[in-house]
Amino acid sequence: MLWVPHAVAWCAGLPEERASKIALSVVAGRTSSPGSFRVGGRAGRFGGTVEERRVRAARGTGLSCKGWGQEAALRMLMNNLDAEVAERPDDLVVYGGTGRAARSWAAFDAIVACLRDLEGDETLLVQSGKPVGVCRTHEWAPRVLIANSNLVPEWATWDEFRRLEALGLTMYGQMTAGSWIYIGSQGILQGTYECFSAIAERRFGGTLAGTVTLTAGLGGMGGAQPLAVTMLGGVAICVEVDPERIERRIATRYLDTVASSVDEALRLAAEAKAERRPLSIGVCANAAGVVPALADRVGADSAIDIVTDQTSAHDPLSYVPHGLDLAAADELRRSDPDAYVERSRASMARHCAGMVAFLDAGAEVFDYGNSLRAEAQLGGFERAFAYPGFLPAYIRPLFCEGKGPFRWAALSGDPADIGATDRAVIDELGDNEALVRWLRLAEDRVAFQGLPARICWLGYGERDRIGLRFNEMVASGELQAPIVIGRDHLDSGSVASPYRETEAMADGSDAIADWPILNALLNTASGATWVSFHHGGGVGIGRSLHAGMVVVADGTDLAAAKLERVLTNDPGLGVLRHVDAGYDRAAAVARDHALPVPMAASPGSDAADLRPGDSSGP
Ligand code: NAD
């Protein structure tokens, strides 16, 4: 047994669990053989393999690199691994299962050293989290080019990926993990808010006030649902099988209250709905029992307006089957995984049938990207695909306008800089009510993780305007240091993902992956500060190809020229991708903005004749 007083001192002020982890790693980092430790009254064991590193991006205007492009990449890499930001920083895992920022700590150190030494006319090459070269380019070229998790299509399976990963040849980059632009759970909250906002707009007059949403799952993603619904004025009933998850959401203020029974949840929801008062209610139960039972009881009288689900249905070994408590589920999962999967799929069939019953009763029902429909179908429910996925249902019209998650971070580290940028966005785009409401609510409700950052959805014609305004604010000294601007890969023109971003394209082009490649090439040619090309983010290996970009507003004229091109061309490609697929809304956006479309379809033209199926689009 080792005592580690230095670790105790170092961890002062941190929660005990975190302090213990750090202590464990301190020990592991100094010894090569397994052993045990004791710190702060807690004992633990270590295997000599865990390595603890505390990483935090520098703040302020002092440079440790030879220019702001390199400094921005360095700070955002480090910010991704900040303990406030990353899920498992010790393992370099930022979020999303095993989405990493660098392949190993040795690779991380080498990237840091390369960035500190990199000239303003050089480009660092990163292959799946490992720096592999520094090349002479020019000042308009990206300072970093990143390729993550890419495999030749016939080899693109989880088994092959894991084999290569175990050999140390690759890493899983997820989306914004390996491209160094993750900003914490604000991104999840905002995406969920945007999705429910689109539903409010489409069906409920722009607000969820006076509506009840029934959903399930309060995990990492799903936990954003109650806050997103109440931000839009609505009532949410969230069914969750694990009481700890409910407690966690209450503690972080994402969930307002917990009901002791489904009946109590219904009563609280009905009262809040009648008063048009926002309220989110957790209830500890199994969704496969509650949802069909509620559909029988209240579906027909419209007490519930919107139904969706964010349980872990993508993995039948994670979803908890009806009739098992958590301990019994754990036991069956261990003792007989095949029987577990069978019960799980049967439960998902019931759960999904309940959702379809709500659909038949007139509720707004959608799949929230968790594969419940596919698993329910495997469980024997034939009408599983009666309701749509959220992307084609609500987000595609936004994609036609090049709209998507646009995010930025203040390299000063001062929240006041984000406050100033929030006000600038409201000043520029104040007639967009949903945007203004989000920015005001975010300022009030969202705690920053790592470098202060903001996210909101902007489209073609808006992003370049905002980017240039930020650059002017840096130049004038209104902002204390440069701003980093990037985006998610839930994006209109840079993703090929037939189960999500490109599900059910109007022309059937769901699996065409030329667009993300064009996106990466275009952003490289337009002056982005770093560009990445990934495989497998979001939906897993073999199922998606996607590209990322980041561009830095450092207040110079050169930055302004780059920002104008990148923030025009990046969303512009999203518009073009949807024009090409036959969406009328995208064609109108292209026309309104004089965006050239070489083979634009017009009635009777060859281009129109070439397209299969319905080219009118939604
Ligand atoms: P998670 O594993 O953190 O949480 C899932 C929650 O569901 C857990 O709290 C679990 O206790 C609960 N649960 C499981 N079975 C249940 C049941 N029968 N009844 C009630 N509760 C049950 O997962 P997450 O990160 O919150 O993600 C949720 C789902 O959304 C996953 O399937 C994920 O793949 C998917 N997802 C969607 C998107 C999107 O774009 N919409 C993006 C990423 C992930």
Image (cartoon, rainbow, N blue to C red):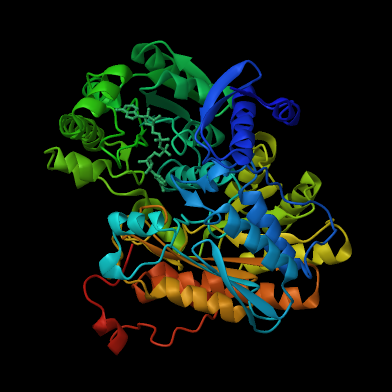
Q: Nearer the viewer, residue 500 or 432?
A: 500
User: Would you place residue 579 above or below residue 176 in this image?
Assistant: below
Quadrant of residue 13 within the rendered picture: top right
User: Residue 355: percent from the left, percent from the top?
Assistant: 25, 34
Q: Nearer the viewer, residue 108 or 194?
A: 108
User: Residue 497: percent from the left, percent from the top?
Assistant: 35, 61
Quadrant location, the N terminus: top right
Identified at 59% across, 18% down, the residue is: 42
Identified at 64% across, 36% down, the residue is: 26
Quadrant location, the C terminus: bottom left
Quadrant of residue 363 within the rendered picture: top left
Q: Quadrant of ligand 1?
A: top left
Q: Nearer the viewer, residue 158 or 182?
A: 158
**Residue 180 can be seen, yes or no:** no
User: Residue 56: percent from the left, percent from the top?
Assistant: 71, 47
- In this rendering, position of residue 326 left or right of residue 455: left
